[in-house]
Image (cartoon, grey):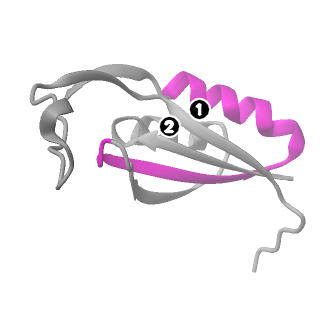
Amino acid sequence: MKMIVAVVQDKDSHRLSNALVDQEFRATKLASTGGFLRSGNTTFLIGVNDEDVDRVLEIIKNNCESREQLVAPVSPMGGNADAYVPYPVEVQVGGATVFILPVERFEQF
């Protein structure tokens, strides 16, 4: 058994949640915040049998797209402002960051 931990952008979370339910996978959703952009994320905890890992990864891949977004950089606090760029920068956001962990034991009460 495996625990899949998938961190996805909030914009993709509803679509991913529906796709997992349609394929009869259960997941726990947790609100989370990204450290770099300080934007909203959703972290999914999905417990699956070993043979279902690839199916779940395909569902995640098909429902979490990366996109370009303009971001205003945060001004430096007490640091050297010489290298500070005060205009928006285009960065890639979205997609999914996925961790697959082994589960030694699972109990449901």
Q: Residue at x 48, y 29 (%)?
A: 95
Q: Say above or below: 29 vs 22.
A: below
Q: Say above or below: 23 vs 68.
A: below
Mark 1 residue element? helix
- Dividing the image into 4 quarters, which one contains the C terminus? bottom right
Highlighted magenta segment, given as a residue range: 37-63
Q: Nearer the viewer, residue 86 or 35?
A: 86
Q: Position of residue 64 (x, y in %)?
A: 48, 29
Q: Residue at x 68, y 32 (%)?
A: 57
Q: Position of residue 81 (x, y in %)?
A: 14, 40
Confirm whether the magenta stretch covers residue 52: yes
Asked if residue 61 lies left or right of residue 47, the reply is left
Q: Position of residue 41 (x, y in %)?
A: 39, 48
Q: Which residue is mark 2?
A: 16
Mark 2 residue element? helix
| Amino acid type, callout 1 | Ile
